[in-house]
Image (cartoon, grey):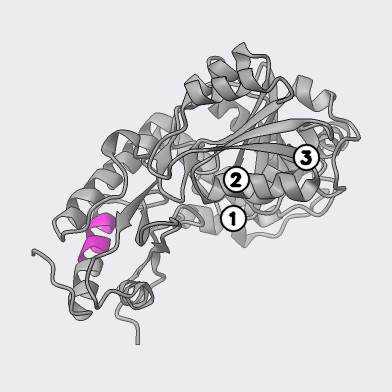
Amino acid sequence: MPLIDRDPLLLTPGPLSTSLRTKQAMLHDRGSWDEAFNRITAEVCRRLVDIVHAGETHVAVPMQGSGTFAVEAALGTLVPRDGKVLVPNHGAYCARILRILATIGRAAVELTVPEDQPMSPAAIAAALDADPGLSHVAVVHCETGTGILNPLEDIARVVAERGRALIVDAMSSYAAVAIDARTTPFDALVAASGKGLEGVPGMGFVIASRTALEASAGRCHSLALDLHDQWRYLQRTTQWRFTPPTHVVAALAEALRQFDEEGGVAARGARYAANGRRLVDGLGALGLQPFLRPEVQSPVIVTFHAPRHPAWDFDTFYRGVRERGYILYPGKLTRVETFRVGCIGALAPADVDGVVDAVARTLRTMGIPTPR
C-alpha cells in the first residue's frame, strides 16, 4: 500500500505536476479542423513568440510529439544538407543533438566541455574561427542532465559576430529563464508544452526566424518533421497538417493564462529559484551535496551526489520516496553517481519541504544515517 493516497508529485524536469485548471482544460473534445480549435492554436503560437520578444522577426511552429521531435524538426529543416553544425557537449541532451545530426545525415563537430562546466563563448568563437565550414551552432541552454545553465546571450553574440546561425534547445529554460530575441539572436529556439509553461507533454514547438524558414523549403529529411511545410500549411489553412494533440493544445492555452496571471517569466523563474534554494538547503541539512557550483546552477533541476554508503541503491531510494508521494529522476552523469530533483511545475514551498522529509525518511529506512 502506498503511504500517500494521491497522485505523486513530479519533482522532474518534465513531465511535471500541473494545476487543476490545466487538467480540467482537457475534459472537452475538440475537432482538429474546427474554427474554435484553430483560434486556440493561433493564440498559443502568438503567446509563445511574445514570451521571448520575437514577434517582429520570428514565428512559432507547433509540432506533434515530445520536445525531441521539435529539436529534430528544427535541425532537419533549418540546417542545409551540406551544412556543418558545431555542438558543444557537456551532457546527455547535447549528446542527443549529435545523435540526431548523425541520424539525419548532417555533418557535426563536437566541442567537448566538462560535465560540471558551462559552455565557453570564447571556446565556441575559437572553434568557429578555426573552421570556416561550420554553418550552424546548436546549444542546449539548460543541460538538465546536470542542471547547468549556459551563458546563452554571450554565446549568441559570438555566433552572430561570425555570421553563423544559432539553434537553441531551450527545452527546460523557456518560460523559466529570461530569453530576449532582441538581444540574443537565434535562428531557432526549441521548447515544449510540458516544461516551464506547466502544460502537459505532447507538443513541441520551434520559434523560428521567418527568414531562415523561408529559405528552408524542401530541405527536410522527413515529411512529418518538415517545419517549413507545417508553417506554410498553418499559414494557408489555420490548421495543422496532420491530426494535432487537441487536448494538449487546449491545456497549454490554459497554462499560458496561468503563466500570465503569475507574472510571466520573472515571477515563474523566481518561484522555481526559491524552490531550488529551499531544496538545496533542506537536502544539505541531510548531508546531501549538489553536484554543481551555485553560480552555474539553473533554477530548473538540481543534481545531488548520491550518499557514499554501502546501503545506497537508487532503485530502493526511488521506490521509498515514491511511496511517500514524490517522483525523482536518476542521475545522467558518466563519472559520478547522482540523482536529480526538479524545481519546476505547480509546486509550492510546502511541496519542497515534503520531498525533503520523504528523502530523509527513506534514507533512514534504508539504514543510511542523516545529520537530522
Disc 2 element: strand
In this view, which residue lies farthest toward the top?
A: 161
Q: Residue at x 31, y 77 (%)?
A: 320
Above or below, comparing residue 85 to residue 5 in the picture: above
Label 2 sits on residue: 192
**Mark 3 nearby-residue class (10 Å; few <14, some 14–19, many ≥20):** some
Residue segment shown in magenta: 351-357
Of the numbered discs 3 and 2, the one sitting upstream in the chain is 3
Q: Circle 1 sits in a helix, a strand or a loop, which is it?
A: loop
Q: Are marks 2 and 1 in contact (CB under 8 Å)?
A: yes
Q: Amino acid at mark 2?
A: Ala
Q: Quadrant of the N terminus?
A: bottom left
> What separation in Å lies between label 2 and label 1 (alpha carbons)?
7 Å
Q: Is residue 277 left or right of residue 250?
A: left
Dot 2 crowding, Cα within 10 Å, few <14, some 14–19, many 20+ = many
Residue matched to label 3: 106
Question: Residue lying farthest left?
Answer: 372
- The residue type indicated by label 1 comes to Pro
Position of residue 64 relative to residue 123, above or below, is: below
Residue that appears at 56% across and 15% down: 182
